[in-house]
Amino acid sequence: MIKVIYFAVAREMVGKGEETLKVENLTVKQLLEWIGSSYPAFDQTGMQVAINEEYAMLDDTVKAGDVCAIIPPVSGG
Amino acid sequence: MIKVIYFAVAREMVGKGEETLKVENLTVKQLLEWIGSSYPAFDQTGMQVAINEEYAMLDDTVKAGDVCAIIPPVSGG
Amino acid sequence: MMKKPFEIVTEPIEIQPYIDYVLHPYQGAVTVFTGHVREWTHGVRTLYLSYEAYVPMAEKKLAEIGAEMEEKWPGIKVAIVHRIGELHISDIAVLIAVSSPHRKAAYEANEYAIDRIKEVVPIWKKEIWETGEQWIGAQKKYPEQGEVNK
Amino acid sequence: MMKKPFEIVTEPIEIQPYIDYVLHPYQGAVTVFTGHVREWTHGVRTLYLSYEAYVPMAEKKLAEIGAEMEEKWPGIKVAIVHRIGELHISDIAVLIAVSSPHRKAAYEANEYAIDRIKEVVPIWKKEIWETGEQWIGAQKKYPEQGEVNK
């Protein structure tokens, strides 16, 4: 199981702040594709994914127990 | 008559903070020369002169009633 | 007020504690940057802003930026705080305090910090106008391999 | 505290009044530079500093620097204060506060101000060490004609 947290516009696109997926050993790219197919309103343009609070690359693997965050383009400051 | 004010190291070189000179219509250059000849410890290296609170050039003229300030290299901040 | 030198807070940001934190007898210069909620942008009136953060990761990224700065400009000391929640006109959203023996590094490092914050720290701003609201964010492409952690 | 936006003072400088002065709803960024008395410089320990100014001319020159800045970076607002008298370790000698709609101008204008202060404002610093004291000042040549007011 992995936990997925959605922030800001990503949260509004999927309509929820977080969820737990019964999957593991999928790539970041596959995770984004799963989100896109599950939530038609989700636009992955500019989205990054953090695994356990660190930015991940598209071919990094998400393992059981990981916490993934869907990170829209940041706009702090 | 003109008033001359000495600041910082200039004041220490001439041993006074200000004085009134019974001269007028002399150039800034002449004023510096007069100070140099009157006070042997006075070194005009880096000194600027302000007339009535504005930086003056060496050939500007000091007139009666002017207030001249002897301005060592500044070191604010 | 200040609990740690790199933090996300919900309460109004006061400046003095961060200056007190970075200042010590070896330092001759302090620069403080504060980013404020601006009422007018290109003729559009902002009512207020709503900031959200991935708090633990944001604090970690702020601390990493501080470490980058101290490596690039040895001898400086840094504190960064960002506020989240509803912020109103002229409220401080972000504060960066940098002390340094000499002023050049204090200016350069400070500007570096705000640039990096806007690039990598997971904080999001929503602008609320009279006519609507919008999440703000550069519409960047998903980074190419190797670019993510640059 | 703050009596005018370009001033020479003898009392300790507090930061907040100058920030409050420059901030208004059009501004999104404030930079504050504070120059502090540093205890150690190249291994020499400073006991304290003594600052002297030609007060009316210094305040006039600070205001001129502010006017130069507002011309170079339209939309900014500036306050500058310099303290004179005996200053001790970590005391603020000079404070420059700049607000701007956007951050770039606030950084650039602020750094411009301190550079100009060190060039043209009639203020002098004497360093007092355990072993002696010395007026500080660049040993510049008397400026050539036309250079004085540059």
Image (spheres, coloured by chain):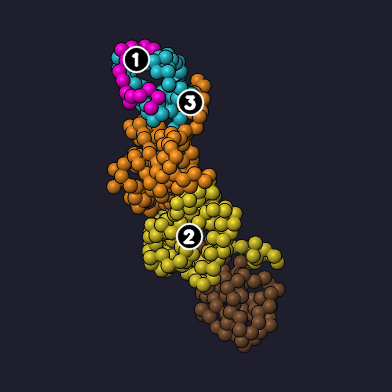
Chain colours: A cyan, B brown, C orange, D yellow
Relative placement, left or right, of D147 versus D95 is right
The answer for how far apart the CA atoms under marks 2 and 3 are is: 40 Å
Q: Three-letter amino acid code at disc 2?
A: Ala
Query: On residue B20, which mark appears?
Result: none
- Residue A22 position (above or below residue D29): above
Q: Nearer the viewer, mark 2 or mark 3?
A: 3
Which residue is tagged 2? D79
Over which residues does the magenta segment extend? A12-27
Query: On residue A63, which mark appears?
Result: 1
Point 50% across, 71% down: residue? D55
Relative placement, left or right, of C145 versus C12 is right
Picture quadrant where residue C6 is located: top left
Does residue B33 appear anywhere in the picture?
A: no
Looking at marks 3 and 1 on the same chain, the residue that comes earlier in the sequence is marked by 3
- Residue C17 position (above or below residue A53): below
User: In the rendered structure, are the residues bearing label 3 and label 1 in contact, judged by CB atoms less than 8 Å apart?
Assistant: no
Residue farthest front in this picture: C131
The answer for how far apart the CA atoms under marks 2 and 1 are is: 55 Å
Which residue is tagged 3? A46
Q: Three-letter amino acid code at disc 1?
A: Lys
Point 46% across, 27% down: residue? C149
